């Protein structure tokens, strides 16, 4: 089946992240079901028109699918049809002319530096392996801005506590170096000392479970949620909130936008600029709260 061949291609040759592969796979099979009316037969790629794709997009919109999700599905189709042009001689890409509504831009959820520090100040017992590991997961996510998937797959050999650097393999197998401070170095050494006492090591990864095996994305997600739950004002309690907070706090403290882009592993500076909006929003709130001329008529600071 053409979809199977394409999924193998983006997984083996393009080295796309597993979550992206799974999403594209689901999107394309959803489209195939729509195109064939739910039949198990394979749709004929040469017969697909842009009008067909518009009908699908319209049906998704009626079902309440968000503009952001529709954009991802359209991206999957666009990539799929380009693959068919390259490998199977398809004459035109019907997804190339697909016009979509622009997704609404939402400011990412962040945690205030004070709340983050309060979470990290709650340190576990020094000999509690799981407690030390989970605390380090949260601390490392906030201090480096890594993605949860990058942290779960972080290799022990790529963590240099003496030099204060991490070597991360990000999206599209792109490697980047992230520096960190002496405080995190000490936490890493403490964790490694406890990890050495595990019954056995059967994984080259940095973060291990109590049996010596590697951890997965869901473990990171659960660890962060448990650490933040009931302690922060953010509606979301995910690893990405720590990544957003890292970027926002860096910019608020004067870091260069391009440097933050490199630390986050963004391909485009436009992606990183969303954090400047958060910084400006916070700055405006502080100004309106503190400056006497910013108060409404008749307002006052109080005695």
Image (tube, rainbow, N blue to C red):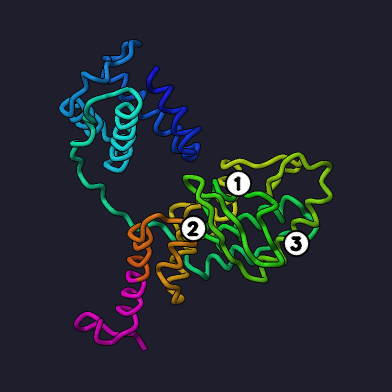
Q: CA distance from mark 3 to mark 2?
A: 23 Å
| Horizontal and vertical percent position of residue 194 | 80, 54
Considering depth in this image, is 273 or 80 the residue closer to the camera?
A: 80
Secondary structure beneath label 2: helix
Q: Horizontally, is 104 left or right of 131 in the view? A: left
Q: Residue at the spot x=33%, y=14% of the render?
A: 42
Spatial CA distance of label 2 from label 1 is 14 Å
> Circle 3 sits on which residue?
189
Q: CA distance from mark 3 to mark 1?
A: 18 Å
Given contact means CB atoms under 8 Å apart, are the residues at marks 2 and 1 in contact? no
Q: Residue at label 1?
A: 152
Q: Nearer the viewer, residue 285 or 26?
A: 26
Which residue occupies 36% across, 23% down? Answer: 29
Quick one: SS at disc 1?
A: helix
Q: Residue at x 23, y 30 (%)?
A: 93
Query: Which residue in the structure is indicated by mark 2?
Result: 243
Asked which secondary structure carries label 3, the reply is: helix
Please say whether residue 39 is one of the residues in the magenta stretch.
Answer: no
Q: Which mark is residue 75?
A: none
Image position, residue 87 (x, y; %): 35, 26
Residue 180: x and y in percent read: 61, 67
* 87 with respect to 200 (left or right): left
Residue at screen point 64% across, 67% down: 121
Q: Which image quarter holds the C terminus?
A: bottom left
In the rendered structure, which segment of residues is drawn in magenta? 280-303
The x, y position of residue 216, in whole percent, is 61, 41
């Amino acid at each position: 089946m053409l979809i199977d061949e394409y999924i193998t291609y983006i997984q083996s040759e393009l080295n796309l992240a597993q979550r992206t592969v799974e999403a594209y796979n689901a999107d394309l099979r959803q489209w195939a079901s729509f195109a064939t009316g739910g039949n198990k037969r394979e749709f004929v790629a040469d017969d697909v028109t842009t009008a067909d794709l518009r009908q699908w997009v319209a049906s998704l919109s009626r079902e309440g699918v968000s503009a952001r999700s529709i954009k991802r599905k359209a991206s999957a189709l666009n990539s799929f049809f380009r693959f068919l042009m390259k490998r199977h001689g398809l004459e035109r890409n019907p997804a190339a002319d697909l016009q979509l509504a622009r997704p609404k831009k939402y400011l990412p959820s962040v945690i205030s530096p004070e709340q983050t520090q309060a979470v990290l100040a709650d340190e576990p017992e020094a000999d509690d392996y799981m407690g030390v590991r989970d605390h380090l997961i949260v601390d490392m996510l906030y201090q480096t801005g890594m993605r949860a998937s990058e942290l779960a797959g972080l290799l022990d050999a790529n963590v240099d506590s003496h030099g204060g650097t991490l070597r991360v393999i990000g999206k599209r197998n792109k490697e980047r170096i992230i520096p960190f401070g002496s405080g995190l170095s000490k936490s890493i050494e403490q964790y490694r000392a406890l990890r050495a006492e595990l019954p056995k090591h059967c994984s080259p990864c940095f973060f291990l479970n109590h049996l010596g095996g590697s951890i997965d994305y869901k473990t990171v997600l659960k660890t962060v949620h448990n650490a933040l739950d009931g302690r922060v004002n953010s509606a979301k309690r995910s690893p990405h909130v720590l990544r957003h907070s890292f970027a926002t706090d860096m910019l608020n403290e004067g870091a260069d936008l391009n440097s933050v882009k490199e630390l986050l592993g963004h391909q485009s500076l436009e992606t990183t600029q969303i954090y400047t909006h958060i910084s400006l929003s916070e700055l405006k709130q502080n100004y309106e709260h503190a400056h006497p001329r910013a108060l409404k008529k008749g307002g006052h600071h109080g005695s």
